[in-house]
Image (cartoon, helix red, strand yellow):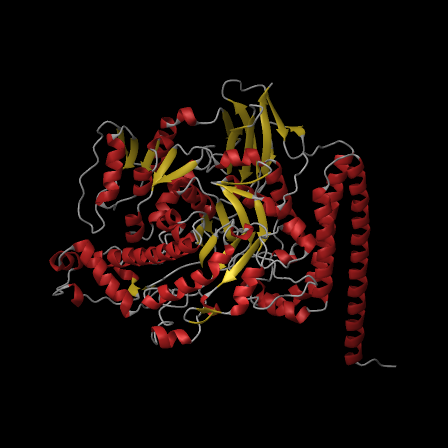
Amino acid sequence: MKIKFKNIKRIVSLFLIITNVVSSQTTEKQVGLKIKELENLVKELDKENIDSYKERMTIFLAKTFLGYANWDEKHIALNTDNFKKVRVYKNKAEQMAKDLPDFERKDVALMLDNAIKTATALSEKEIFRKPYQEINWSKIKHDKNELTYKGKPVFLSDYTWKPEVKELNKFFGELDGVYIAPTQLKASGVVNPATINQIKNKDKGTAGFVFIAHTPPSKWTLKEYGDDFLTYGGQPFTHYDIDNPGARKMMSELLEKTVPYMVDKNYTQLGYMLANEPRWITYKNQNKKVWYTGGVSHYTKAKFKTWLKNKHKNITALNKLWKTNFSDFEDVSIEIPIDISLMGTSKWYDWTTFNEDRVTDWFTYLKQELRKNDPTAKAHLKIMPSFFTDNDPCTGIDLEALTELSDINGNDVAAHYNNIRETADWEGDYMFGWRELYMGYDFLKSVKPDQINFNSESHLLSTSSTRDLYMNPKYARAVYWAAYTLGLNAVQTWYWPRREDGSLRGKMTNAYGGSNNQQPRVTQELQNTIIDLNTFSEEITAMQHQRKPIRIFYSKTSANQESTYMDGIFDLYESLNFEGLPLGFATKNIINKQANKNWDVILVYKTAQVTQDELDALQMYLDNGGKVIVDSVSLKKNEYGLPLQILKESKGTLVTLTSLDQVKSKALFTVQKELPNLTITEVGNVGKKKCTWRVVKNKKGNDVLSVINLGREDVELKIRYKKNPKNILCKDLIKGVKVSSSPVLAPYEVFFVEVQSN
């Protein structure tokens, strides 16, 4: 009998379905056995009074992801659609979706294998664990630049959109909060009663923050504030004209009607977030698409004319700088979006500086209105530090001014495991892009050292342009360990879009495929890292509080006028970031407002243009006995390209050098007394160093060393004391055992040890 080809295909298809079902059932059965084995080990650990919090978290996570895998197996089409939204998965989206459930189950199995291995080693006394203090989020205290629980610093971690499930909260955070927005205004002065009742009836809650959104207000605002009220916003998250007087009236009414009910609640401990990812991009580029750029209203243009008059005093001065012939300031006209080809000109400088000033003025007003209704309120903004570190032009965001305005160092800093859009410039040297994280947090800590750092939308794991389903879990440890040692106190990671049953919430955008809710081991390793950071929170906090003896001078003027300015600053930062010494920044305001004894030397590198005020701050520092190292191309012109007087040594020390290597060497020589008494040598390395490290003293007076390998290859280290190089002991603090003082660190590896002389 002949079998038709069509029937053969059906038989093969049925065979594959049966095979997949049997395979998934086998994997799930195997995982179930591993869960039981780990549960039995937890009982043994508990009997021996060995902390088992990590293992209990892992068991819960394993069961959770098994449920997710089962849901994914029934929703191949939906997952296919989500994978299609990710550039690198677009052409294989269906296969990715089909493979996903099996990947998740196998990843859970690997996660359990590792947990069983660790639990067995603990039980057999091969390694030792310091007990973990579980955190009661309703009893957190916020004291200046620390969050504490029972008198000890703690680091908080949660996820955006994580569902309110008891065990999820227990292991992955209990961040609380309230959402308010102008959409809740039914008419001028009238807030939706449901919103008021919700806030009134809400209990004190746990540590959290108030999310103030600026989504499109209701249409009644057009009648009251003008037809163009919703036309000139700060896209994509501020949907109205902040320079229209109606904006202030509207937001004042919203805050007045809602904030008084939130005073002294736990869910405001992490502040009121005045805006989500604020930006007012107002430039165009003929050679490249500019996202979210737009024009401005007649209200904004009128403000600009007043700003120009206050700055330049007379129209003749403006015309000379702009090369124009306006009859008076009312006659001034400018095309917005402004063309990026004008960067470096007087017109570009004035517009971009004004754009920042008007945005800062807007948030200053919002904070004033907030404080009227809650005098204890702490304000912050979810600012993208990439605007600063990447030198993005004309965004309206002055990171320093807005951080000075804030009471919490708010941000949504990102790091980059990969770049799915293009080849990244860091990939030749490093395993991940760390520029935004390291420079961004060191800048925030330099501007406001006495405030906590709250990343309310962490893109350390993934962003729209960073994704890898097969991410090395060690990356999660490396990047979060780096963030907390640099000053992070609380984080809400992007993101947890699954509901309790594994289904997906709406509006997934392009962010889901290949992200952490499909990655059991990554999710577990992140939480293991948070547990370890909290277990040794005093040592990590000491690293956060370390003095920053070397300060790199940052000029807003050069940043506005030179597109590659921050590339040069990063070159200097990078050269110093692997010497075991905390780095900081100096600006005009930091020099003028902070105690100059907080640092030993200021480095000025590739900073050609500064205002007279910036130059005066450096001169004052020298007059007071400070030390400045400057390269030969810096401090030559003011914001309009006019020549400046040179710095004078005065009572201080002024050194002019010509190369990056000279600046680095002289800086390290200047602060040699501040250098750690440990030396870390990367054996055989003749290129760029790859391991960042910090050293602090613990309560016993011993050194605690933290090292992260950012490089692409294994790195052998030689750890020695300067005065006693031969006899040295290292103890792994997480495993509680002695380890080599010449370890080999794999990429992403964190080495956290107590060091003593023998």
Q: Is residue 123 left or right of residue 154?
A: right
Residue 648: % across, % down: 20, 32
Residue 335 seen from this side? yes
The front one of 692 and 282 is 282
Residue under the image location 44 percent in, 60 percent down: 255
Residue at left offset 47%, top offset 58%: 259
Could you tell me residue 757's position as x and y percent?
Answer: 58, 20
From the viewer's perspective, tell me whether residue 460 is left or right of residue 242.
Answer: right
Image quadrant containing the C terminus: top right
Relative depth, front residue between 571 and 410: 410
Residue 257 placed where, x, y %? Answer: 46, 63
Residue lying at the far right in this picture: please name it: 1
The answer to which image quadrant residue 253 occupies is bottom left
The N terminus lies in which quarter of the figure?
bottom right
Is residue 284 in view?
no
Task: Tell me where residue 448 appears, x and y as whole percent.
Answer: 41, 42
